[in-house]
């Protein structure tokens, strides 16, 4: 169900919702822009079509403003991946809103822990994550890192959040408007 979020500092209405198949070309463009900057892993169109259900997107005036995905590894653990915001819309709270939806989704699945590999650990730490050794997540290292051409010179940090430590997130009537579902 879409959620309308009015951001605190600006009169802008974002819709946060699960991705649809029609979002895939825009997801591909946004993620691979950052892959080109060498700060995210690239994703192919085929990969995105296969895994589009993992994505939550932020949409503003009909345009993709940001995205993030929840990759399930087991009954307990999932990865936050491909989290990014349109370069022109950074630092407006969009990344935080996408993350809050992904964490709520993780809680809904009954997961215990989420983790990410990122070049922006400070952003994650502001949302309650803490830095840990990358080897804490061997499946991720085996599946993605060992195949990555930057494995030997990787500058990504592993960050993790135990969902039990997450404060109960009550809607703030000052910043989050009523749902605008249709
Ligand atoms: C990282 C990213 C998703 C953050 O999204 P955003 O919409 O710009 O961030 P927000 O405005 O929601 O910021 C939330 C908080 O994190 C801080 N923050 C955001 N990006 C940050 C960064 N790169 N480094 C340190 N702090 C950061 C903000 O200052 C803000 O702090 P505040 O609450 O004290 O004001 C976005 O900048 C991005 O797309 N970066 C490129 C891709 C990337 O690095 N993705 C990370 C996952 S691999």
Image (tube, rainbow, N blue to C red):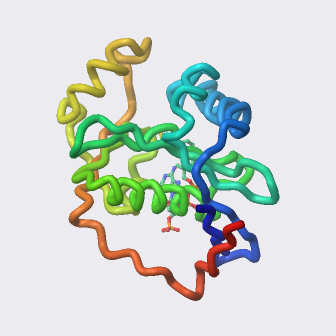
Q: In which quarter of the image is residue 7?
A: bottom right
Q: Quadrant of the C terminus?
A: bottom right
- Is 105 positioned to the left or the right of 9 in the image? left
| Total marks placed | 0
- Is 83 positioned to the left or the right of 77 in the image? right
Residue pictured at 54% horizontal, 26% vertical: 50
Q: In which quarter of the image is the N terminus?
A: bottom right
Please provide percent x and percent y for residue 69: 48, 42
- Vertical relation: 124 (above or below) 133: below
* Residue 140 in sight from this viewpoint: yes
Given the current orientation, which residue lies at the most extreme right position? Answer: 61
Given the current orientation, which residue lies at the most extreme bottom position? Answer: 174
Please provide percent x and percent y for residue 151: 36, 17
Residue pictured at 78% horizontal, 50% vertical: 63
Please provide percent x and percent y for residue 173: 56, 87
* Residue 130 in sight from this viewpoint: no
Please provide percent x and percent y for residue 152: 33, 15
Of residues 129 and 103, which is closer to you in this image?
Answer: 103
Residue pictured at 56% horizontal, 36% vertical: 52
Residue pictured at 32% horizontal, 53% vertical: 109
- Vertical relation: 30 (above or below) 174: above
């Amino acid at each position: 169900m879409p959620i309308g979020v009015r951001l605190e500092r600006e009169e802008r209405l974002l819709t946060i919702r699960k991705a649809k198949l029609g979002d895939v070309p825009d997801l591909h463009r946004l993620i691979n822009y950052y892959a080109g900057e060498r700060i995210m892993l690239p994703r192919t169109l085929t990969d995105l079509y296969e895994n589009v259900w993992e994505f939550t997107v932020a949409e503003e005036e009909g345009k993709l403003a940001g995205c993030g995905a929840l990759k399930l590894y087991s009954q307990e653990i999932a990865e936050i991946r491909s989290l990014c915001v349109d370069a022109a819309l950074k630092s407006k709270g969009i990344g935080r809103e996408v993350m809050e939806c992904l964490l709520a989704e993780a809680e809904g699945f009954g997961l215990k822990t989420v983790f990410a590999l990122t070049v922006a650990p400070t952003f994650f730490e502001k949302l309650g994550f803490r830095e840990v050794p990358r080897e804490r997540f061997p499946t991720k290292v085996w599946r993605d890192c060992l195949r990555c051409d930057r494995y030997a010179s990787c500058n990504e940090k592993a960050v993790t959040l135990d969902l039990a430590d997450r404060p109960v997130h009550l809607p703030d009537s000052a910043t989050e408007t009523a749902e605008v579902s249709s």
